Amino acid sequence: MPDAGPTAVLPRRPLTVGELLDSAVLLLRGHARVLIPAALVLATAEQFLLHPLRVAAGARPPGFVFHLGQLAPYWGLLAVGAATEAVIVLLLGNPAARAAGAALLGRTAGPGELVRPAGARPGATALLAAGVGAVMLVAALLGPGWVVAWALLGSVASALVVDRVAAARAPLRAAALALRAGCRAAAVRLLGYLVWWIVRVGLGVGVFYGLRALGLVDLTDPAWAVPVSGAIWAGVNGVAYPALACLDAVLHLEGRMRTEGLDIRLSRAPAGLGEPALLAADR
């Protein structure tokens, strides 16, 4: 059995909320070479996608805040932003979930393993990312529906690549795990989002105004302010998104230990059983 002390990435036991957050950070730190570059590419693409919507909504950098009289386009901007966040976190959740599964079994997955298509189910992941993005878009347009959708869909990637369930079952599996134990996983996922939202806003706005105070470039000029702000937000999200994906992966496996006895199953597993079979959910 792997070390269950405080330095273990994912101990084989139910965890406190603080331990879950710590485990997610440890998982990200151990696999930053894969997760952060991928996140930076996706976060940069997101900035290009959101730019015309920000222009239409009259949202200006660095905070892109709401302006009276632009409610409809700004609401659409928020909804698309919520959808792109969900898609990116799910895509990053695929390698994060496989890394978390390896950590639970007492080893560290190498970068090559995380980018290898074998076992990653890339086609199903892409289809589920598109579906989750569509759900988040509609839910965000409905306002409070975003909170419910975000809380319930965190384990989709883990259900697909760790539990090895059929793609059609993955969202239902994720929602079921999120609702167990008094909606504990759903609440922790929302808490994690709130924590990282505060960090993102603080860094995104703070770095922009810090650069403006230094006077290296004229950030009162939109020709500079827009690309610089976009680069800052891409950089901030390039860390926040994989952190959220790692939290989802840790939450999923911890939820299985808490409600399905995965830790007990692993301790009793016969020698020689392959990793996919060890972690796969019961059919």
Image: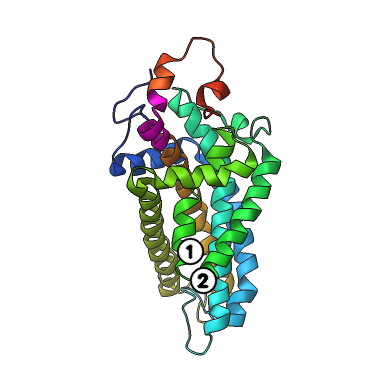
Q: Percent from the top left, x then y, of residue 55? A: 61, 80
Closer to us: 2 or 226: 2
Q: Quadrant of residue 260?
A: top left
Q: Percent from the top left, x then y, of residue 36? A: 53, 46
Q: Which residues are magenta?
A: 254-263
Q: Percent from the top left, x then y, of residue 194? A: 37, 59
Closer to us: 183 or 124: 183
**Residue sticking out furthest to the right:** 123
Q: Is residue 53 left or right of residue 281?
A: right
Q: Amino acid at mark 1?
A: Trp
Residue located 50% across and 41% down the image:
32
Q: Name the residue that disc number 1 marks.
A: 146
Q: Is residue 84 above or below residue 57?
A: above
Residue 260 part of the magenta-drawn span: yes
Q: Residues within 10 Å of mark 2 (few under 14, many from 20)?
A: few
Residue located 44% across and 61% down the image:
147
Q: Main secondary structure of the magenta part?
A: helix
Residue located 29% across and 26% down the image:
5
Asked whether the beta carbons under mark 2 and mark 1 sit within 8 Å of each other, the answer is yes
As drawn, the label of residue 142 is: 2
Looking at the rendering, in which quadrant would you find the N terminus? top left
Helix, strand or loop at label 1? It is helix
